[in-house]
Amino acid sequence: MTTMRVVVIGSGIVGAAAAYELSRRGAEVVVLDAGSPGQATAAGAGIVCPWVDHPDDEPWYELARAGAVHYRELEETLGLGYARVGALLVAEDPAELDDVRELLHRRRPGAPEMGDVADVRDPSGLFPPLDPALHAVLVPGAARVDGRAVRDALLRAAGAEVLHRTAVLTESGEVAGMDADQVVVAAGAWSGRVCAPLGVDLPVLPRRGQIVHVTVDGADTSGWPIVLPRRGPYLLGFPSSRVVVGATVEDAGFDPRVTMGGLDEVLSAGLRLAPGLAAATVAETRVGLRPVLANGRPLIARLTDRVVVATGLGAYGLTAGPFAGLVAAALALGEPPPIDVTPYGV
């Protein structure tokens, strides 16, 4: 048999996962990445808690949930640093938690991986800087991942050649200057631009998210749960006394800047939730351009007989990205995808 040669455009979480899945199925893979500033994978916080969102969009929820389940399979194979730390859904008014509590109990029979949802009387006992007056619901199955580490592990396991250059598609779906039987476009917010020569208008837009990393001297933050307020920025702990606070949601175009207004929004909201972080040291700021489509749905589809596209995961890139890469790889190889991709079409 002749080995299929596949070019993957984009080395973020989706592209890296596609390269890994293609490689393990015997394809020869080359990854192209333009290195554009603002790539979402490098900036994302890494929250894996799909059960609390998309109450009225079952296909979106099923994709995100499949992503959460898929992480456990990848962790067993690759050791990605996946940490099941749980998530606290918090609010000042306990009545604000009624809807999400009902949603979780409704979804629990079909999603046992979320664990046994429970009310928490003192959420600051689990996340010490929190305002002790907050009310909370605990989702024990929620996890955190380091997006950069996951991406790098997938690319290493793929053994694919990674070329740092801009990919140019031709009208016929070929990559200029390269031989390829199939092309997977996983270029995040830039996917619409990449696919434009095909004559297909993909309304993929960048949505800016600014995130702040702080360190809490002397604190072991590695086991702190994710904190998800019903409105506004989140908090989550990582090893090395690090806490991540984010993120803004800004339709600012392809503008990967950290702004004073963005930092003020994130820090002010973070301190309202967790006044105990007031003395934390600001260690780093990150900004990512999350890919979103006009209809709000992800896009995982075959565009031509040669080109497959996977993008539009928005704020759920690190949740659903590895699974979306798996689906894209199956489409490129002509295999039945693991889910019905009809809801994610053009």
Image (cartoon, rainbow, N blue to C red):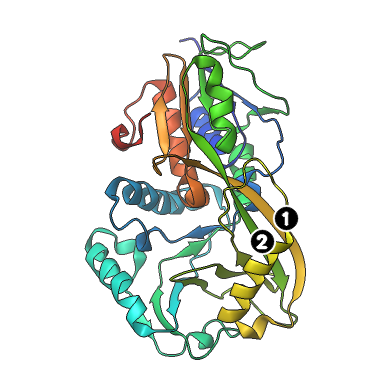
Residue 297 picture quarter: top left
Looking at the picture, tell me which residue is in the foreground, 233 or 307. Answer: 233
261 over 75 or under it: above or below: below
The percent position of residue 96, horizontal first and vertical second, equals 36, 77
Q: In percent of the image, x 67 and y 30: which residue is there?
A: 33
Kind of residue at disc 2: Gly
The percent position of residue 319, horizontal first and vertical second, equals 47, 52
Q: In percent of the image, x 49 and y 16: which residue is there?
A: 199
The percent position of residue 233, horizontal first and vertical second, equals 55, 67
Residue 89 picture quarter: bottom left
263 over 61 or under it: above or below: below
> What residue does disc 1 label?
258
State the CA–CA distance, disc 1 to disc 2: 7 Å
- Say if residue 4 shows up in the picture: no
**Which label sits on residue 262?**
2
Say which element carries label 2: helix
Looking at the picture, tell me which residue is in the foreground, 217 or 153. Answer: 217
Residue 163 picture quarter: top right
Q: How many marks?
A: 2
